[in-house]
Structures are given as structure tokens and as C-alpha cells.
């Protein structure tokens, strides 16, 4: 049983973002390849590699969110927030990895403690797990109880 808004804003947002993340991952793959071809050890900077992989993986995670949103029994605004918040977290993680890859000044973003590496990480944890938990609980409540 699908929610009445199975083709609504939450699903549209998740599928569209999945496409953006996948395209980003493909473009980052070109950057990674070029860096590997130029480097004497044939390795891309660590965060170029991480950005590439994260973008590809988050594109599929966005599709999982889209599918769970289709079955959400919650109001449209709750479902859309439960999808949107993790997507913003995923996007900000990819952007951070790209920034670190461009700087190529570290192989460990936690080397220097900043707002991002302390409170920012906790906000990502709460946003990603919280959004998914809402959608997954909705699925369980609607279909497995």
C-alpha cells in the first residue's frame, strides 16, 4: 500500500537528488582518474577518492529514501522533512569531501578540530539517522504491524 503522495514532493526530491549525486560521482570519477594518471604513485588524493565514492553511494541511498517515502503513512510535510534532511546531510558531506580534495592538505579531516568536525558531525548523525528512522518506522508501522 502506497501513501497518497507516493509521487509527491518527497519522492521527487529524493529521485532528483539521486540523479544529481550520481552525476556528481561520475564527474568526480574523471577528476580521480586524472589525478591517478598524473601522480607518481598513481593514487588520487584521499578526499578526491572519498568524494567520488560517497557521491555514488549517496545516490543509491537517496533512492532508498525515495522508496521508503512512497510507503510513508505520515503527513506529507513529515515525510518530506524526513527525506530532505538526510539529503542535505549527504550533500554537505560530499561538498566537504570535494573541498578537502581540492585543498589536498590532509588525509584526515579530523586532524584539526573545527565546528564541522565536532558539532557538524553530530548534526549529520542526527539528521541522517533521524530522517531514515522516521521513514523506516513509518514503513514498519504501515506494513509490518
Image (cartoon, helix red, strand yellow):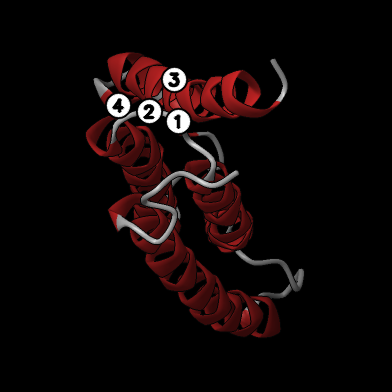
Disc 2 and disc 4: Cα gap in Å? 32 Å
Going from N to C along the chain, the mark reached first, 3 or 2, is 2
**Any mark on residue 73, and which?**
1
* Quadrant occupied by the N terminus: top right
- Residue marked by disc 3: 130
10 Å crowding of disc 4: few (<14), some (14-19), many (20+): some
Q: Nearer the viewer, mark 1 or mark 3?
A: 1
Residue 61 versus residue 7 in the image, above or below: above
Disc 2 and disc 1: Cα gap in Å? 4 Å
- The image quadrant that residue 77 belongs to is top left
Q: Nearer the viewer, mark 1 or mark 4?
A: 1
Q: Secondary structure at mark 4?
A: helix
Residue 104 versus residue 36 in the image, above or below: above
Disc 1 and disc 3: Cα gap in Å? 16 Å
- Residue marked by disc 4: 116
Between 32 and 140, the residue placed more toward the observer is: 140
Between 125 and 119, the residue placed more toward the observer is: 125
Between 143 and 95, the residue placed more toward the observer is: 143
Asked whether, in this view, residue 127 is left or right of residue 45, the answer is left
Q: Secondary structure at mark 2?
A: loop
Q: Residue 75, position in %: x, y?
A: 29, 31
Residue at image position (46%, 22%) is 134
Residue at image position (37%, 32%) is 82
Q: Residue 30, position in %: x, y?
A: 57, 84
Disc 1 and disc 4: Cα gap in Å? 34 Å
10 Å crowding of disc 1: few (<14), some (14-19), many (20+): many
State whether residue 88 appears in this view. Answer: yes
Going from N to C along the chain, the mark reached first, 2 or 4, is 2
Going from N to C along the chain, the mark reached first, 3 or 4, is 4
- Residue marked by disc 2: 74
Amino acid at each position: 500500500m502506497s501513501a497518497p503522495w507516493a509521487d509527491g514532493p518527497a519522492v521527487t526530491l529524493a529521485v532528483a537528488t539521486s540523479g544529481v549525486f550520481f552525476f556528481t560521482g561520475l564527474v568526480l570519477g574523471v577528476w580521480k582518474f586524472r589525478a591517478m594518471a598524473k601522480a607518481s604513485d598513481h593514487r588520487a588524493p584521499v578526499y578526491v577518492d572519498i568524494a567520488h565514492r560517497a557521491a555514488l553511494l549517496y545516490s543509491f541511498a537517496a533512492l532508498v529514501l525515495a522508496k521508503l517515502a512512497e510507503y510513508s503513512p505520515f503527513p506529507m510535510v513529515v515525510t518530506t522533512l524526513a527525506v530532505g534532511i538526510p539529503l542535505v546531510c549527504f550533500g554537505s558531506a560530499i561538498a566537504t569531501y570535494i573541498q578537502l580534495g581540492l585543498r589536498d592538505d590532509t588525509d584526515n579531516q579530523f586532524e584539526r578540530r573545527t565546528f564541522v568536525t565536532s558539532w557538524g558531525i553530530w548534526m549529520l548523525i542526527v539528521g541522517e539517522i533521524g530522517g531514515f528512522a522516521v521513514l523506516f518506522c513509518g514503513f514498519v508501522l504501515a506494513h509490518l504491524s
